[in-house]
Image (cartoon, rainbow, N blue to C red):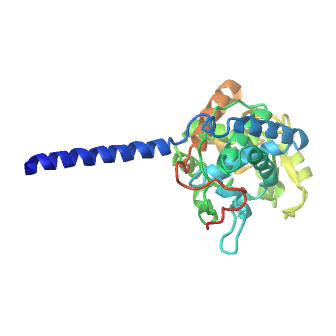
Amino acid sequence: MGAKAFFFFALLSFSAVSLRAAFAEDEEDPGLVMNFYKDACPQAEDIIREQVKLLYKRHKNTAFSWLRNIFHDCAVQSCDASLLLDSTRRTLSEKETDRSFGLRNFRYLDTIKEAVERECPGVVSCADILVLSARDGIVSLGGPYIPLKTGRRDGRKSRADVIEQYLPDHNESISVVLERFAAMGIDTPGVVALLGAHSVGRTHCVKLVHRLYPEVDPVLNPDHVEHMLHKCPDSIPDPKAVQYVRNDRGTPMILDNNYYRNILDNKGLLIVDHQLATDKRTKPYVKKMAKSQDYYFKEFARAITILSENNPLTGNKGEIRKQCNVANKLH
């Protein structure tokens, strides 16, 4: 065989090996797909849904927590359940940062994880449980059912040190909020829809007293100010005290478009709510969502889907945690 022919066959066999390796890698890592656990744990999504329903019956505020979790986890670099990790001697937990103030009910995610582990040990990630509990929690609150892909794996480290670079604060300018979400691929109507999650739950007085003391923010609706002052009588509230204002007094337990009507009426509790209703980039969408719940739900579902697919760990990356609050021990 001549040198040229040998080189040609060598090249062919090298290409075949490379292709096989590439296909093997693809087989190992399909990325996120619908019903990822259909073979390894076919009951996984049903178990999560049932647990969310049971927990919601017992503790109505769990659904708000599921919804906040997806935002606080997936918006910070990756949808990898880093939010759920406890602090260690070396690292601070994301749960203990200022941005996570008011997040709670993490123990109920452990309840869901335990139920899934009983059926299929070591198969379903905490990252997928976090995302699917948010999906089912949205339904419990009267929101739309959003089909979401699965196949995420769990990260091994807290992202507390970068949290402020990714999670916008409620006092940031609307420009910063739009920028942060745009970096994840969420456009302006998507941002307006995601903030509609402020339609449910409550805001602690710590987060809004600067709009009441020493002077009342003049843009606030005077009728609403009276209620806010009644609920937040102290200019320096105790963060541990149960002092809060419901985000939407009309339908506080229902995810609906009432939020948009409230903020157009200057009843938004947070600075970001007010800016959303007044900034020329966002106001047209606020008005559209105030008029049409269908439009709001369509944009909300689209934005939640993008958020849930933000830079996940898949294939061989990350791990499947045994317990959601601690990374697995490496032997």
The x and y percentages for residue 89 are 70, 75
Which residue shows up at 71% across the image and 49% down it? 121
Q: Residue 184 vs residue 65: left or right?
A: left
**Residue at left 75%, top 49%?**
113
Residue plotted at (85% across, 62% down): 235
Q: Residue furthest front?
A: 1
- What number of labels is visible? 0
Residue 142 appears in the figure: yes
Where is residue 120? Give x, y as percent: 71, 44
Q: Nearer the viewer, residue 196 or 44?
A: 44
Q: Nearer the viewer, residue 271 or 52?
A: 52
Q: Is residue 264 visible?
A: no
Q: Where is the C terminus found, in terms of image quarters?
A: bottom right
The quarter of the displayed image where residue 195 is located: top right
- Relative to 152, 257 lies left or right: right
Does residue 180 lie above or below 256 as drawn?
below
Examine the rendered structure and indicate whether residue 139 appears above or below residue 99: above
Q: Residue 78, how many percent across, how many down?
A: 57, 52
